[in-house]
Image: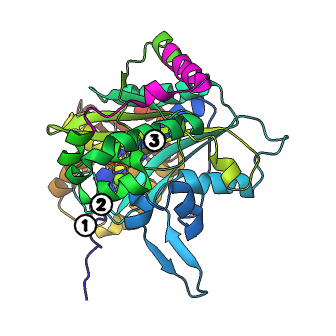
Amino acid sequence: MKLQKPKGTQDILPRESAKWQYVEEFARKTFGNYNYQEIRTPIFEHYEVISRSVGDTTDIVSKEMYDFYDKGDRHITLRPEGTAPVVRSYVENKLFAPEVQKPVKLYYMGPMFRYERPQAGRLRQFHQIGVECFGSSNPATDVETIAMAAQFFKEIGIQDIRLHLNTLGSSASRAAYRKALIDYLTPLKETLSKDSQRRLEENPLRVLDSKEKEDKVAVANAPSILDYLDEESQAHFDAVRGMLEALKIDYVIDTNMVRGLDYYNHTIFEFITEVSGSELTICAGGRYDGLVEYFGGPATPGFGFGMGIERLLLVLEMQEVELPLAEELDVYIAVLGQEVNGKALELVQALRNQGFKAERDYLGRKLKAQFKSADQFQAKIIITLGESEVEQGQVTVKNNQTREELTVSLEQVGTNFTDIVDQLEC
Ligand code: ATP
Ligand code: MG
């Protein structure tokens, strides 16, 4: 029996989980300012919710799904991404109803599952923070959503992150482009990777997205979707570009970026950064105007993105960004002798009840070892409690930085510790 975690998964231990909480809180705050609210959907879905919407021929569906039949013989999959489940929920819960304010702005965070070859920034259980906005086809929605991601990255401290922008246009534009791409790629078919030879038949745009060297060579001179946009698609793209420029958000146009999911149209984008010399996409998204209708709802435009938390943390670490994690303890109680064990418990509880982050010794250790613990917990204040303190009803309270001490009554510590903290200036 293997008593180890499955391949491609991670245990997130305390020091690390503090960073996760910080990142998650940061996202909640940023997205909240844009009037987004949280949605939580199940971690597993009916297979069909994902398969056709994401695309039967995509890598996600054809190779990476964690799917199984449950005891009731239902075909279930662990969710590989967040958009399809949120759209399913939007339709199922009738959030399209007129009484629900539009646009409906939702964010989510949680685990996703893909059967991939694990490597740096690529896991089998990974986590995404994502947003979906329903009900606005206004290009300002595309731009504010991209701006929100840009603001998040900037304020959390990530440097050298590039926004790659493209459009897939309307379905008519895409059909015309598809034809041109097939004409271009067919003579090169033999030079393509096996996967891309198949993609050429099934979904030629996906060849542009391939990470294989030979495919990258083949598509280097491929026709550009930008030459096949109809009037409406061109106008939408121009508006997006204009508004990005007005907000001074830098971007590069990347016509070979098509995204690995089938539901996109018009604007698509990725935020890409470099890690040890190779490019890493942290965040990706775009417009998906047909998806709500596909799930049986009324025609409703949609726009969203997903970002990978593990990749975000990887980049923060590589760039040596110090997250301001509030890990220090307010008070540590050093306990001298078994006799005062109960009193120490009462005291530490009284401090916690006043809202202080407090810890004590439980192990009856030597004072020196206890002070070492206090330092490791970065305790701002140390109180030493022994038999004589209890007898006299007084304790010494020490500012662990300045070493300044105050002798105060146990009564005051238990009821009004704030004043003591103020006097010790910590
Ligand atoms: P890639 O091209 O790197 O495989 P993708 O196009 O499959 O990415 P999306 O489906 O757009 O990725 O997911 C959005 C984000 O989720 C990615 O930019 C990345 O940050 C993260 N992500 C995707 N797959 C994984 C994974 N297996 N492990 C960790 N993070 C992932
Ligand atoms: Mg992928």
Q: Tell me the number on the disc at residue 179.
A: 3
Q: Name, please, the residue furthest toward the right.
A: 99
Query: Of the residues shown, which amino acid type is indicated by label 2?
Result: Asp
Seen from the viewer's position, the closer of residues 344 and 200 is: 200
Residue 309 is inside the magenta segment: no
Seen from the viewer's position, the closer of residues 82 and 210 is: 210
135 left or right of 364 in image: right
Query: Can you give x and y, in whole percent of width and height, for residue 63 in the image?
Result: 37, 66
Query: Which residue position holds label 1?
Result: 364
Residue 223 is inside the magenta segment: yes
361 left or right of 414 in image: left
Q: In the rendered picture of this protein, how many numbered marks are placed on residues?
A: 3
Query: Can you give x and y, in whole percent of width and height, for residue 170 in the image?
Result: 58, 35
**Which image quarter: residue 72?**
bottom right
Kindly report the secondary structure that dominates the magenta region of the rendered protein: helix
Residue displayed at 70% across by 36% down: 135
Query: Can you give x and y, in whole percent of width and height, for residue 197 in the image?
Result: 30, 56
The magenta stretch spans which residues? 219-242
Q: Which of disc 3 and disc 2 is earlier in sequence?
A: 3
Query: Which residue position holds label 2?
Result: 361
Seen from the viewer's position, the closer of residues 127 and 253 is: 253
- Colour approach in the figure: rainbow
Q: Residues within 10 Å of mark 3 (few under 14, many from 20)?
A: few
Residue displayed at 25% across by 60% down: 194
Label 3 residue SS: helix
Q: Is 70 above or below relative to 136?
A: below
Query: Can you give x and y, in whole percent of width and height, for residue 324 in the image?
Result: 33, 34
Q: Is 299 above or below relative to 222?
A: below
**Which image quarter: residue 111?**
bottom left
